[in-house]
Image: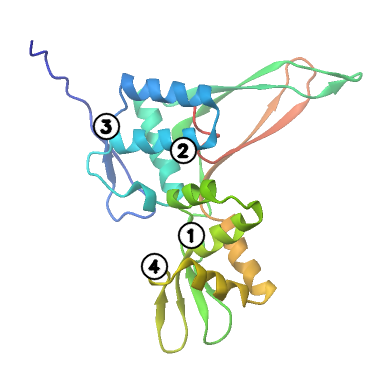
């Protein structure tokens, strides 16, 4: 039996890395089920894989999701969530404030508007000069980096994995050396030869990369303690 086909509204959202707005459809019951299953699993890899699958399903014009900066994925997912289920939602937190040696335990409801979550550090400078002649052009962390971190077995190597994968290119007075044309070993060797203060500049860039970030102050109705709640990153907004 040929059942009727259902049409869907099409929305668009501007991303930091794309010249033109990206078009998407709302997610369907099948994608909502994926979200629920990922939320129940409470595993980083499952959450990341689910977000990637949902975004790929809902994009009208396919793009390389792995190469998108994390901030663009946050923008896209928040808009997708807002247009699919609703712009407003509520988060719930347990008050951990101690009153007379006992934790309050009150459940605090925090309503938020997904489309009003600010993006911080939109215009972060990507060029880092190590001297008058040598420096690097950085790029924002991407979805691909998360996958590499998950695969990194040695915790002490994770920091270097992020840093070398956020290099777009290295330059000197005569040439530009694209990071994609170098091996991971070559990039790591370059980083290892930097002075610590120069390396810290690269770390600071990554730490300050644009992201969706929301700080909420909410008073507990039971013990009156004023909570300061910080939300940022894909997992915090996976709601």
- Marks 3 and 2 sit apart, C-alpha to C-alpha, by 20 Å
Is the residue marked by circle 4 packed among few (<14), some (14-19), or many (20+) residues within 10 Å?
few
**On the image, numbered disc 2 is attached to which residue?**
48
Quadrant hosting residue 6: top left
| Residue 236 x %, y % | 55, 34
Q: Earlier in the sequence, mark 1 or mark 3?
A: 3
Pointers 4 and 2 in contact (C-beta within 8 Å): no
Q: Is residue 183 above or below residue 93?
A: below
| Residue 75 x %, y % | 42, 42
Query: What residue is shown at x 52% (from left), y 78% (from top)?
Result: 135
- Marks 4 and 2 sit apart, C-alpha to C-alpha, by 24 Å
Quadrant hosting residue 229: top right
**On the image, numbered disc 4 is attached to which residue?**
180
- Which is more foreground, mark 1 or mark 4? 4
**On the image, numbered disc 3 is attached to which residue?**
25
Answer with left or right where residue 135 lies relative to residue 64. right
**On the image, numbered disc 1 is attached to which residue?**
123
- Which is more foreground, mark 4 or mark 3? 4
- Marks 1 and 3 sit apart, C-alpha to C-alpha, by 28 Å
User: Which coloring applies here?
Assistant: rainbow
- Which is more foreground, mark 2 or mark 1? 2
């Amino acid at each position: 039996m040929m059942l009727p086909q259902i049409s869907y509204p099409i929305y668009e959202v501007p991303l930091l890395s794309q010249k033109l707005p990206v078009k998407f459809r709302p997610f369907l019951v099948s994608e909502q089920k994926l979200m629920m299953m990922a939320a129940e699993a409470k595993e980083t890899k499952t959450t990341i894989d689910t977000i990637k699958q949902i975004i790929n399903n809902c994009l009208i014009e396919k793009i390389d999701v792995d190469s998108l900066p994390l901030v663009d994925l946050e923008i896209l997912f928040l808009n997708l969530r807002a247009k699919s289920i609703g712009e407003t939602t509520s988060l719930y937190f347990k008050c951990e404030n101690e009153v007379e040696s006992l934790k309050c335990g009150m459940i605090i409801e925090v309503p938020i508007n997904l489309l009003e979550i600010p993006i911080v550090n939109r215009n972060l400078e990507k060029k880092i000069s190590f001297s008058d002649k040598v420096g690097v052009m950085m790029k924002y962390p991407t979805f691909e980096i998360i996958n590499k971190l998950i695969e990194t077995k040695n915790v002490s190597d994770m920091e270097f994995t992020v840093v070398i994968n956020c290099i777009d290119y290295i330059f000197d007075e005569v040439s530009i050396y694209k990071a994609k044309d170098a091996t991971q070993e070559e990039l790591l060797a370059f980083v290892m030869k930097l002075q610590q203060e120069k390396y810290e500049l690269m770390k600071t860039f990554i730490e300050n990369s644009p992201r969706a970030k929301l700080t909420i102050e909410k008073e507990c109705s039971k013990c009156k303690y004023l909570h300061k709640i910080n939300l940022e990153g894909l997992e915090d907004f996976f709601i």
